[in-house]
Amino acid sequence: MTISRGVVCTFVILALAGAGAVDAQQAPQPGPEHAILAQDAGTWDATVEMTMAPGQPPTVSKGVETASMLGGMWLVTDFKSEMMGQAFTGRGALGYDPVKKKYVGSWVDSMSAAINLNESSYDPATKTMTGWTEGPDMTGEVVKMRETTEWKDADTRVFTIWSTGPDGKEFPGLKITYKRRK
């Protein structure tokens, strides 16, 4: 007989709660860092620009992101678009790790067999989140790339993943401009 990991985790949590090891008053609570994430809840129309190499014109497509907060702690996103002539779906989760004092997240999509992990910091003066994402590139090789999200205003944000060209210089390989749907 096999028991799923979820059943085992549920049993352990219930056992610990019964033993007084889990106290609801000690559960983490959303803070000001989570308010940064909450500003992205809603539905967003996206313009996606993919540039394969420096100096080449981007391929442009449209997409829609739906985002909601999970327990006030995690921003969970669902993204739908078309990429390279194919339907594209992606899902992300972004939260704040109080131990690392960083925003941490994950991304999975319909064109990749591996997960992307990311970590970033927020600068309130520039309203920009800057960090890195690590996952497979178009060839399947695992790479670490810089990423930024800049909030232009309450209804516009720009997400960019910076690729490295053959000359070793960065260029915006993926740029998504989001406009909040009214």
Image: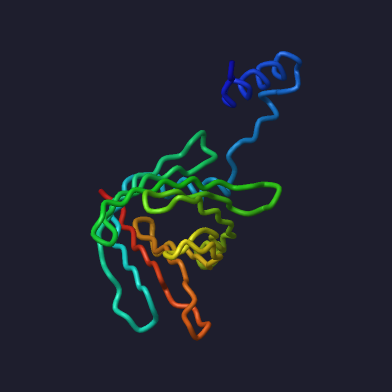
Residue 180 coordinates in the image, percent (x, y): 31, 53
The quadrant where residue 34 appears: top right
Residue 30 coordinates in the image, percent (x, y): 58, 39
The quadrant where residue 66 appears: top left
Residue 163 coordinates in the image, percent (x, y): 47, 72
Q: Residue at x 54, y 39 (%)?
A: 73
Residue 79 coordinates in the image, percent (x, y): 35, 49
Q: Is residue 78 left or right of residue 18?
A: left
Q: Is residue 132 above or below residue 170?
A: above
The number of numbered discs placed on residues in the rendered structure image is: 0
Q: Residue furthest bottom?
A: 167
Q: Compare residues 162 and 164 and report the one nearer the observer.
A: 164
Q: Residue at x 75, y 22 (%)?
A: 21
- Say whether residue 76 is visible: yes
Q: Residue furthest top?
A: 18
Asked which colour scheme the image uses, the reply is rainbow
Q: Residue at x 27, y 70 (%)?
A: 59
Q: Residue furthest front?
A: 1
Q: Quadrant of the N terminus?
A: top right
Q: Is residue 125 left or right of residue 17?
A: left
Q: Residue at x 47, y 44 (%)?
A: 75
Q: Compare residues 169 and 166 and report the one nearer the observer.
A: 166
- Say whether residue 149 is visible: no
Q: Compare residues 106 and 75 and report the one nearer the observer.
A: 106
Q: Compare residues 98 and 107 and report the one nearer the observer.
A: 107
